[in-house]
Image: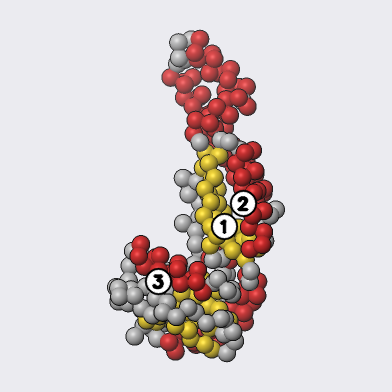
Amino acid sequence: MSTYVYGITAASHPALPDGMDGVGDPARPVRILKEGELAAVVSDAPEGLRPKRKDLLAHQNVLSEAGADACVLPMRFGSVAPDDASVTQVLAERADHYKERLATLDGKIEYNVKAVHDEEAVLHRVMSENSEIRAMTEANRQSGGGSYEQKLQLGEMVVAAVQAREAEDAAEVRGALESVSAAVSAGPESSGWLANVSFLVDRGEAEQFLAAVEQVRVAHPHVDLRINGPLPPYSFVEPGPAEPAGTTIGADTGKE
């Protein structure tokens, strides 16, 4: 029977709630595998597991419950090993890495912040800030809309100004929130977002971080900020040494 891995924690981790279930239909009971000073939160792995909403929520719920009282290094959805022995082997071989990460991430949570421009608002801002664009817009208006070449030139100028504003706003958002976080991890670049960044935050400073997010919103009304969290610190479980052949457990990036 394959073993599904939810996360890695210390062997001294408080016991899990009785009757906790994980992924699968029917849901598989969650249990603990210990190896030295470490432990893995696992269950039997159902066959043909797919990222359906029910199982994604089950995975997240196990991590939330297990991480309520002590630090847990979250694994990605679908982390499966051939059997229990393979899991404990990884714990033994990567013990130093996991113990270092547990110590570093203890008492910390993750917030993922995505930023996108309000198209109408950013165009208004670009127009107000760029006198050359304003002058060309007015000249085209007075000449009945301008020639094809003039319209093309104006469009290129607007696109360039918006792209410059995107870069500036992304840097400003990150800089403002980086100052109230313990660490930062940039997510994959996407044409849909001008920023996609995860922040590691001390639990006791979560309110301060959220207040900083609100200050950024007020200072940048043309930017739509979307925040997800608190989350387990998915983006800060750094890769360790190569895993033994046959295992697929690993850390989640948590960045879509």
Above or below, 26 against 132 in this view is below
Q: Label 1 is placed on what type of residue? A: Tyr
**Closer to the camera in the image, 55 or 118:** 55
Task: Work out whether mark 2 precedes mark 1 in sequence or the reverse, and give the earlier one.
Answer: 1
* Distance from the alpha carbon under mark 2 to that under mark 1: 9 Å
Identify residue for label 1: 111
- The label on residue 82 is none
Instruction: State the quadrant of the N terminus.
Output: bottom left
Residue drawn at the location 62% of the way across and 22% of the way down? 131
What percent of the width, then of the height, locates residue 15? 52, 82
* Residue 238 placement: quadrant: bottom right
Residue drawn at the location 58% of the way across and 29% of the way down? 125
Q: Tag 1's secondary structure? A: strand
Q: Is residue 48 left or right of residue 127?
A: left
Residue drawn at the location 55% of the way across and 71% of the way down? 68
Q: Which residue is the extreme one toward the front?
A: 18
Task: Work out whether mark 3 precedes mark 2 in sequence or the reverse, and give the earlier one.
Answer: 3
Q: Is residue 199 left or right of residue 146?
A: right
* Residue 124 placement: quadrant: top right
Task: Work out whether mark 3 precedes mark 1 in sequence or the reverse, and give the earlier one.
Answer: 3
What percent of the width, then of the height, locates residue 232? 54, 66
Above or below, 158 against 242 in this view is above
Q: Is residue 129 left or right of residue 191?
A: right
Identify residue for label 2: 210
What percent of the width, then of the height, locates residue 53? 35, 62
Q: Label 3 is placed on what type of residue? A: Gly
Q: Tag 2's secondary structure? A: helix
Q: Nearer the viewer, mark 3 or mark 1?
A: 1
Q: Label 2 is placed on what type of residue? A: Leu
Identify residue for label 3: 78
Q: Which residue is the extreme one toward the right?
A: 179
- Could you tell me if the residues under marks 2 and 1 are in contact, i.e. CB atoms within 8 Å? yes
